[in-house]
């Protein structure tokens, strides 16, 4: 069983940076495909970034500002978020896909395990 725990969220001013971490237990982070999603009040959960065996994927809203990476020593997947905007305010979730294939990394249905989420608020 894989368990995911997000951390690093908080309240920041627009333009600031945050690093979110997703701690993985039950599997090594290098053996699973991982994604970050977010959900704002009244909106659907949306894809932000994902990392497979050798590729990374980003939503248009994240390109150039966010970076996803693995830390094998800590067994985490991190999301570096720069130049935060008020529209980035949401609950951020990490997710894991145990399949050896990573065909649709942007879709929530691809992922087998989800964390409980961490709140990110960027104030104007």
Image: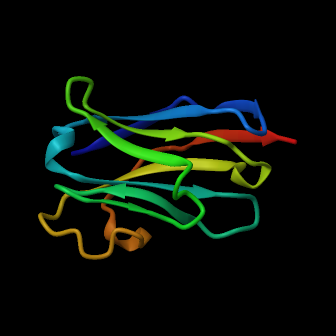
Q: In which quarter of the image is residue 82?
A: top right
Closest to the observer, 64 or 98:
64
Above or below, 88 against 30 in this view is below
**Most extreme residue toward the top, as rendered?**
73
Q: Which residue is drawn at 69% across and 43% down?
A: 84
Q: In which quarter of the image is the C terminus?
A: top right
Q: Could you say where residue 24 lies in the image, as x and y percent from the top left? A: 29, 36
97 on left or right of 116: left
Above or below, 22 against 104 in this view is above
37 on left or right of 77: right
Above or below, 73 against 88 in this view is above
Q: In which quarter of the image is the N terminus?
A: top left
Q: Which residue is drawn at 50% across and 44% down?
A: 116
Q: Could you say where residue 37 lies in the image, as x and y percent from the top left? A: 51, 57
Q: In which quarter of the image is residue 118?
A: top right
Q: Could you say where residue 86 lies in the image, as x and y percent from the top left? A: 79, 49
Q: Which residue is drawn at 27% across and 24% down?
A: 74
Report how many numbered discs are placed on residues in the image: 0
Above or below, 57 against 93 in this view is below
Q: Residue at x 60, y 62 (%)?
A: 61
Closest to the observer, 43 or 74:
74
Q: Could you say where residue 35 lies in the image, as x and y percent from the top left? A: 38, 55
């Amino acid at each position: 069983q894989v368990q995911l725990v997000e951390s690093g969220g908080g309240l920041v001013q627009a333009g600031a940076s945050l690093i979110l971490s997703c701690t993985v237990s039950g599997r090594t982070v290098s053996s699973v495909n991982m994604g970050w999603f977010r959900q704002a009040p009244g909106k659907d959960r949306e894809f932000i970034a994902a990392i497979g065996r050798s590729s990374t994927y980003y939503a248009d809203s994240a390109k150039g500002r966010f970076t996803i990476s693995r830390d094998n020593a800590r067994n985490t997947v991190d999301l570096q978020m720069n130049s935060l905007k008020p529209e980035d305010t949401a609950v951020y979730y990490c997710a894991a896909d145990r399949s050896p294939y990573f065909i649709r990394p942007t879709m929530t249905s691809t992922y087998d395990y989800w964390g409980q989420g961490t709140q990110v608020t960027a104030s104007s």
